[in-house]
Amino acid sequence: MDIEMNDELGVEVELDGTLAVEDAFTTTVERLAAATAMLEQAVERMFERQGELAVSAEASVGRIVATVESKREVELEQKLAAAEAEIAELRAAGASAPVAVTHSQGRKTLPVSMVNLLAKQGVAVDSMEARALDAALVSLSIEQRIAVKAQLIRAGLLG
């Protein structure tokens, strides 16, 4: 009984002869091997493209990072230049400022506690003399005398 059929791949198969079946299987296997080879090549190309894309992406990231770093450097250089200019201005302004504060320019007020302490000792703040001050401070300890004199010097009332 000779029956001719078409298999799934379009190969005529004769069921009567074993040689025809073997040829059909051989042809099918060869086609499958060719399809497998083509798929392997396609996969290799995809991996190559993926690698190229990864390299391209790394290069893009590198360029972006370099651009950001250069912008930061420019900003820092601008801030440094502004700070140096401000320092130069302050130094120039400092050169014209008076170096020492005289008694006429300085502060002539004392804390209330200091004025009260001196008043108890009989010393008037307006007419202070060194001898009167020393005499008034005799009853105080050394630390208290130093503190009183330091306050008077800061207030500009004692030279």
Image: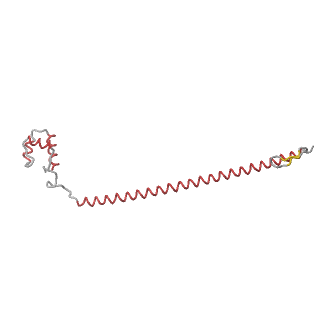
The percent coordinates of residue 122 (x first, y second) are 6, 42
> Which residue lies at the image location 8% right of the left edge and 49% below the top edge?
126
Q: In this view, does 6 lie to the left or right of 124?
A: right
Quarter holding the N terminus is: top right
The percent coordinates of residue 32 (x first, y second) are 77, 48
> Which residue lies at the image location 64% right of the left edge and 53% below the top edge?
49
Which one is in front, 13 or 128? 13
The percent coordinates of residue 141 (x first, y second) are 13, 38
The percent coordinates of residue 155 (x first, y second) are 16, 49
> Which residue lies at the image location 22% right of the left edge and 59% below the top edge?
97
Q: How many marks?
A: 0
Q: In this view, does 81 lie to the left or right of 153?
A: right
Which one is in front, 12 or 30? 12
Q: In this view, does 124 lie to the left or right of 1?
A: left
Which quadrant would residue 103 be assigned to in this image? bottom left
Which color scheme is applied?
Answer: secondary structure
